[in-house]
Image (spheres, rainbow, N blue to C red):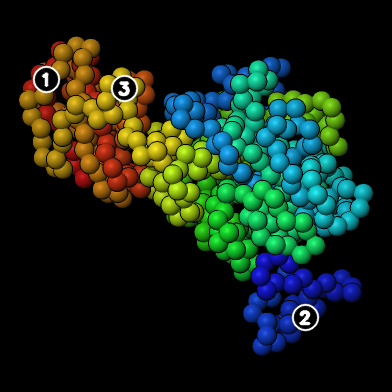
Amino acid sequence: MGVPGWHVVQTSRRLSRREAEAFMRELAADPSVAHVAADEVYVLPHVEEASERPDDPRYGTNQWHFHDPLGGVNAEAAWDLANGDGVVVAVIDTGIVENHEDLQENVLPGYDFISSASNSRRPQAGRAPGGWDVGTWRSAGYCGAGTAARNSSWHGSHVAGTIAQTTDNGLRYAGLAHGARVVPVRVLGACGGSAQDIADGIIWASGGTVPEVPANEHPAEIINMSLGSVSRTTCPALYQDAIDTAVANGSIIVVAAGNDNDQAGLYTMSSCDKVISVGATRVTGGKAIYSSYGGRVDLSAPGGGGSVDGNPEGYIWQTINAGTQRPTAEWKGGGMTGTSMASPHVAAVAAMVQSVAETPLDWQQMRDLLVETSRPFPAFVSVDMSMGAGIVDAAAAVDRALGNARCDGQSDSCNPDAVVLTRNVSQAGVSVAKDERIVFEYTAEAGKALTFSTVGGTGDVSMYVGFEAVPTADEHAFASRRPGNREVVRIDARQVRAGTYYITLVGESDAANVLIEARQ
């Protein structure tokens, strides 16, 4: 294998579970053997597909996940500064359909690592150049007793489209890092993917050496992995070794947290070290019901709420092939949900950051930047179901990489004329006329609950709160619009980040002698 020190052992006949366990114990007893593990099968997380698809899907009406002020990733402001130009992103998945009508300009040569002909759906066994998705359909029982029939998903094309689909070409959908290039690394077929193929795919994507496979001429700075274990399985040593090698080669690995509505750290890939784990949110900015959660999730991104949020708002849309088995010459809009859809948003933002960073970031620097610039959840997320620091914010991340402060779009300066609030000290005598505003700022400590409140005086004010950006009535992270002057915004400790929070008070009517306080 390409993973240092690892080898595949294949028995001459199928072993029973008891025989396999005895054989592995015998191998492990050899003092020259460090680890022994079964070559497990990994699969795509379950995704919900839209039951109906619009005839003419468009960016403005369908791709809420890029521009919606609550659930989106703030793509438009980021595109003024970066589009991922020059960065290579590897998509370890089902491959990409060859000659994809709205993606092919941004696809580089990849590789198909699926060794089994029946799983790959290619006519011959063994690995092959290209990385093209030739279909993952199967009939009932094809992958063993009890496996259900299904059509080809074109999952890898959908994921790659979110990252780098051609944009501003008048055709279907946009891609987030549409200046980047994607390398398809095919590891998932009709029956999933084997651990050995996935591990070697990770090594190859990063520019590492894999026996009997030509070198990857376009090593990936970012690797996206929207796949995982079917049951609770912590990170196998094989995967961790592959990840360690890829990170040492300079790659940053972004993974889907999983669709099990369970602790992400109990499953592969989120249980592995040196990866950025991504949960999924809905159009409301709240947790998608299926998304895994917990302390191992670093941040979240749009994955869609499915039928709960309706169509198209409930789905992540990209162009996929219209074939049900093998690819055809027809294409259509495909709406899917899942952490598989959330992860490529973060991978794309990472590519955008790398494209403007003066010095390329390593995986820890990238994770910290994405976490610190993420937008607080606009909808309540239970402490017991933590979804990381917030929703990935493309503009804030690119701004940070460029060394810029965020502006509110209405100020002439990135340093607004704001009144400084001191922790637990009341600011009295605040007055604001009808339809006017006054801005305050507060420097917060990470991980401590934060409350902004107003009380007393006369008139009526509304409160809007933003992180590293001056909020308005239209664009804000939190808001309180009660009648009168008793406004309160509470931010859970797990959502509070180190940095500057801006608080805008707007006069709904003339207000005077209002008291404002920041408590932390």
Which quarter of the figure is the C terminus placed in?
Answer: top left
Q: Is residue 83 visible?
A: yes
Residue at left offset 32%, top offset 28%: 407
Secondary element type, mark 3: loop
Which quarter of the figure is the N terminus placed in?
Answer: bottom right
Residue at left offset 74%, top offset 44%: 109
Q: Position of residue 144 (x, y in %)?
A: 84, 56
**Which comes sooner in the sequence, label 2 or label 3?**
2
Residue 195 vs residue 64: left or right?
right
Q: Which residue is mark 1?
A: 431
**In this rendering, which labeled residue sits more in front, label 2 or label 3?**
3
Q: Which residue is mark 3?
A: 472
Secondary element type, mark 2: helix
**Which comes sooner in the sequence, label 1 or label 3?**
1
Amino acid under label 3?
Thr
Residue 172 vs residue 513: left or right?
right
Q: Which residue is mark 2?
A: 23
Callout 2 touching callout 3 (CB < 8 Å): no
Gap between marks 2 and 3, in whole Å?
65 Å
